[in-house]
Image (spheres, rainbow, N blue to C red):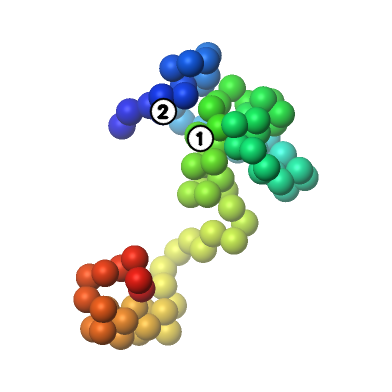
Amino acid sequence: MGHHSCCNKQKVKRGLWSPEEDEKLINYITNYGHGCWSSVPKLAGLQRCGKSCRLRWINYLRPDLKRGSFSPQEAALIIELHTILGNRFIYI
């Protein structure tokens, strides 16, 4: 896995996110919103690039992110839509 090109332009931390960093990002975004992602790391007190913060928020930390297995109703809907649309999961 490579690093973002913006990480080469400034001194930023790379690698795994610590629970403290997650907490800082969550607190900042819940209090102020994300606005411009390139300014979030500095304002939140993180040594990460804006792209890393955006990806961390979208893929792992969002409060509306559903985790776990599909419900039986969701599984049935996926199977039904797959029958109609095939492997075009972007439309499902």
Residue named by callout 2: 4
Q: Looking at the image, do the residues carrying marks 1 and 2 touch, with CB atoms under 8 Å apart?
A: yes
Q: CA distance from mark 1 to mark 2?
A: 8 Å
* x and y percentages locating residue 65 in the rendered image: 54, 59
Dot 2: within a 10 Å radius of its alpha carbon, few (fewer than 14), some, or many (20 or more) residues?
few
Q: Is residue 14 visible?
A: no
**Is 33 in front, or is 20?**
33
Give the residue displayed 41% in from the left and 73% down from the top.
70
**Which label number is shown at residue 51?**
1
Q: Amino acid at mark 2?
A: His
Q: Is residue 48 visible?
A: yes
In the displayed structure, 6 sits above or below 20; it is above
Numbered mark located on residue 84 in the image:
none
Instruction: Name the secondary structure under disc 2.
Output: loop
Instruction: Please tell me which residue lies in front, 52 or 37.
Output: 37
> Along the line of sight, which residue is nearer the eye, 83 or 74?
83
- The residue under the point 59% across, 61% down is 64
Specify whether 27 is left or right of 57: right
Q: Counting other residues with Cα less than 10 Å from the Cα at mark 1, is it few (<14), some (14-19), or many (20 or more)?
A: some
Quarter holding residue 40: top right
Amino acid found under the numbered disc labelled 1: Lys
Q: Quadrant of the N terminus?
A: top left
**Total labels drawn:** 2
**In the image, is 10 to the left or to the right of 35?**
left
Question: Residue at horizontal 33%, vertical 28%?
Answer: 2
8 horizontally vs 32: left or right: left
Q: Residue furthest right?
A: 31
What residue do we see at 77% from left, 45% from top? 31
Q: Which quarter shows the C terminus?
A: bottom left
Indicate the position of residue 63 as horizontal and vertical percent values. 62, 56
- Vertical side of 59 occupied by 91: above or below: below
